[in-house]
Structure formats: C-alpha cells, structure tokens
Image (tube, grey):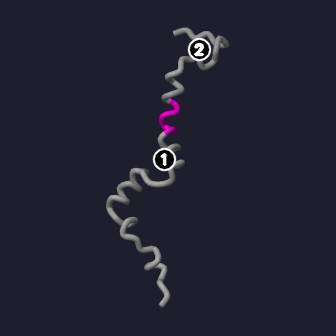
Amino acid sequence: MRATSLEQDFSIVIGGPLFQALRRAHLTGTVVQLVVMTLLPVAPLLLTMISPKELLGQLVKVIL
C-alpha cells in the first residue's frame, strides 16, 4: 500500500498551536537564522554606543 502525499506531510508537532505561535514569533529555524535575526536589530544600537571619535579616530572633529 502506498502512502498519499497528505499522509506523508502529516505531523502532530508541526500542526500544533505552540509550534504555530513559535512560527509567528519567528522563534523556529536554524541557529544561523536566529542569530542573524537577533543581531540585525541590535547592530545599529551597538554602533551608536561607540563615540564618533573612537569610530573615526582623530580625522573628524565632533562638536557637541
């Protein structure tokens, strides 16, 4: 007896409400995806924490 495509794709875990909530929150996927999604919004904040003098050296005079 041959399984249909519906039977092959069936999974209790993937169809569960917890998994669907995690998918909507983008908390599933590979480790690389999770790291990129975490660092992408944080990177601009880290760059703004570095003072412009430290970032550019003495090339630019910053007046605040």
Q: Is residue 41 located in the magenta-colored stretch of the structure?
A: yes
Using the image, determine if residue 54 lies above or below residue 30. Answer: above
Residue sitting at the far left: 17
Q: Residue at x 33, y 58 (%)?
A: 18
The numbered disc on residue 34 is: 1
Asked which secondary structure carries label 2, the reply is helix
Asked which secondary structure carries label 1, the reply is helix
Using the image, determine if residue 58 lies above or below residue 39. Answer: above
Front disc: 1 or 2:
1
Which residue is more in the foreground, 61 or 29? Answer: 29
Under mark 2, the amino acid is Lys
Magenta segment, which residues?
Answer: 39-44
Under mark 1, the amino acid is Leu
Residue 19 horizontal side relative to residue 50, left or right: left
Distance, label 1 to label 2, CA atoms, is 32 Å
Q: Which residue is mark 2?
A: 53
The numbered disc on residue 1 is: none
Residue 63: x and y, percent?
55, 9
Q: Residue at x 47, y 84 (%)?
A: 3
Q: Residue at x 50, y 44 (%)?
A: 35
Q: Residues within 10 Å of mark 1 (few under 14, many from 20)?
A: few
Residue 6 horizontal side relative to residue 16, left or right: right
Mark with earlier residue (1, 2)? 1
Q: Residues within 10 Å of mark 2 (few under 14, many from 20)?
A: few
Q: Is residue 10 located in the magenta-colored stretch of the structure?
A: no
Q: Residue at x 48, y 79 (%)?
A: 5
Residue 28: x and y, percent?
44, 54
